Amino acid sequence: LVPAGTVAGLALALAILLLARRQMSIANALRHALRKDEFFLLYQPIVELATGKWVGAEALLRWRRATGELIGPDLFIPIAEQTGTITKLTGRVIRLVQRDAGRFLVDFPGFHIALNLSASDLRSTAIVDLLDRLLAQTGARPANLIVELTERALLDIGSARKVISALRKRGIEVAVDDFGTGYSSLSYLESLELDYLKIDRSFIEAIGTRAPTSQVVSHIIRMADAMGLRMIAEGVETQAQADFLIANGVQYAQGWLFAKPISFDELSRALDGTLPE
Ligand code: C2E
Ligand code: CA
Ligand code: CA
Ligand code: CA
């Protein structure tokens, strides 16, 4: 008979092995998908709360497999991050933004496209070169771009600081994504040059409820104000949430109340004629 501890140990090792194999097979599928051009972007409008105007859009990655199956980023981004495929994927995102929005941004210099970067994208300034190339090849302005960095990506403060200052020197704006879900302290954020703070959906959901989290939103807003950061509320689904945000001085929002992520064609058709030159 084998001791129970050994059995548990073997089961654990097997589970880890299976998980690793599943990740590797998804990582292989991702590399294949890059070659086959199976990725595209949807754009979720960012709304100025005071006017309801669409002032920008966040680029959100989608994977359409040859089978027609649509895979969301929550599934494949973490695996791409763990297996090192993410930098290639980010490069693809930048090229897709260039293709979709390049001309549009030249015509509408006031419009912003926000794109998501991962922690590994900040390990070198190669990312800055990619964005420079996007700007050079399209004629879009640096102020057309917002880069979204999660608190987790900011944890490696040395490299984050380098990339952030290179971006901001060019006039590209920087947002802290999913704010409130990570580990960053106030003093930590204060030591970085940032433009926007995106309030995570989990806090917006709590607005108007009795959950203790609902108190946190007001604190976050006061803090961002004190730091001179503009705010973008994420996942706004109800008018009551929007009213609260407006009353508390939050400038921008995203969410199903205003618009779901849509194709760039739909976005530009909806905006046609409504934007100032
Ligand atoms: P995120 O950056 O926090 O993006 C916001 C997510 O909230 C999007 O999910 C969006 O579709 C969803 N959302 C927007 N409004 C609402 C709402 O009113 N209600 C609800 N319930 N959800 C809403 P999505 O597109 O599935 O993206 C999930 C995450 O995947 C993103 O979260 C981001 O962390 C990551 N991601 C997406 N595209 C990229 C990318 O190009 N690069 C990287 N590194 N990560 C990406
Ligand atoms: Ca984001
Ligand atoms: Ca977010
Ligand atoms: Ca989020």
Image (tube, rainbow, N blue to C red):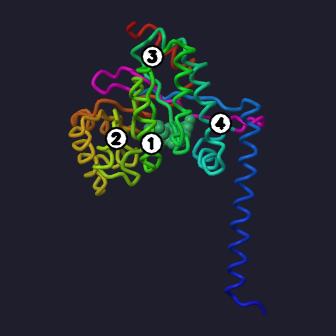
Q: Which residue is mark 4?
A: 88
Mark 4 and mark 3: Cα distance apart in space: 24 Å
Q: Which residue is mark 3?
A: 141
Pick whichever of labels 1 and 4 is earlier in the sequence.
4
Are the two marked residues, 1 and 4, in contact with CB atoms closer than 8 angstroms? no
Pick whichever of labels 2 and 4 is earlier in the sequence.
4
Mark 2 and mark 4: Cα distance apart in space: 26 Å
> Residue 192's mark?
2
Residue neighbourhood size for the residue with mark 3, other residues' Cα within 10 Å, grouped as few (<14), some (14–19), many (≥20): many
Report the front residue among 60 and 267.
60
Q: Amino acid at mark 1?
A: Ala
Mark 3 and mark 2: Cα distance apart in space: 23 Å
> Residue 61's mark?
none
Name the residue at 52% across, 22% down: 132
* Magenta span: 47-69
Residue 197: x and y in percent read: 35, 38
Mark 2 and mark 1: Cα distance apart in space: 9 Å
Name the residue at 33% across, 36% down: 193
Quarter of the rendering containing residue 262: top right
